Image (cartoon, helix red, strand yellow):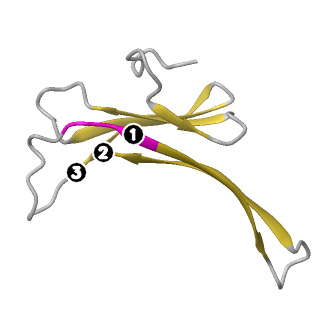
Amino acid sequence: MFPSWMYSGHKNYIESPDGNIKLYVIPSPAKSSPYEFIYSVTAFGKPVLNQSSLRLSSPHLNFENLHLTGVEKNMHNGNWTDNSGPKKDIPDNYNEATIF
């Protein structure tokens, strides 16, 4: 289920491999904050992290004309070896997104 404030006709989130945890990211709807993004996290369809803002700032970069141009999503399914723990093969499965 999309939180209503996030819905724009397409998926603005990345989810865990099992689909139970979702991280939503959208540009701020406030015209006064063009270099700000809004994000939230849900788990099993319930809010875990309410709407929060992420503001980009730098003394060397100008973010005034920043806009979201795309999202590239990738999935990783693998294992890594723990030589010191009781379990040797540790699952390393995740989804990732690069926001342009």
SS for callout 2: loop
- Most foreground residue, 13 or 76: 76
Rendered residue at 19%/26% (across/down): 30
Disc number lying in front (3 or 1)? 1
Q: Quadrant of residue 47?
A: top right
- Between the C-alphas of marks 2 and 1, the distance is 6 Å
Task: Report if residue 75 lies within the magenta region.
Answer: no
Which residue bears the numbered disc 1?
A: 71
SS for callout 1: strand
Q: Would you say 66 lies left or right of 17 here? A: left
SS for callout 3: loop
Q: Earlier in the sequence, mark 2 or mark 1?
A: 1
Relative height, residue 83 to residue 3 (above, below): below
- For the residues labelled 3 and 1, say whether their Cβ atoms are less than 8 Å apart: no
Range shown magenta? 67-72
The residue lying furthest to the bottom in this view is 84
Q: Is residue 52 visible?
A: no
The residue lying furthest to the right in this view is 86
Q: Would you say 60 lies left or right of 67 here? A: left
- Most foreground residue, 28 or 80: 80
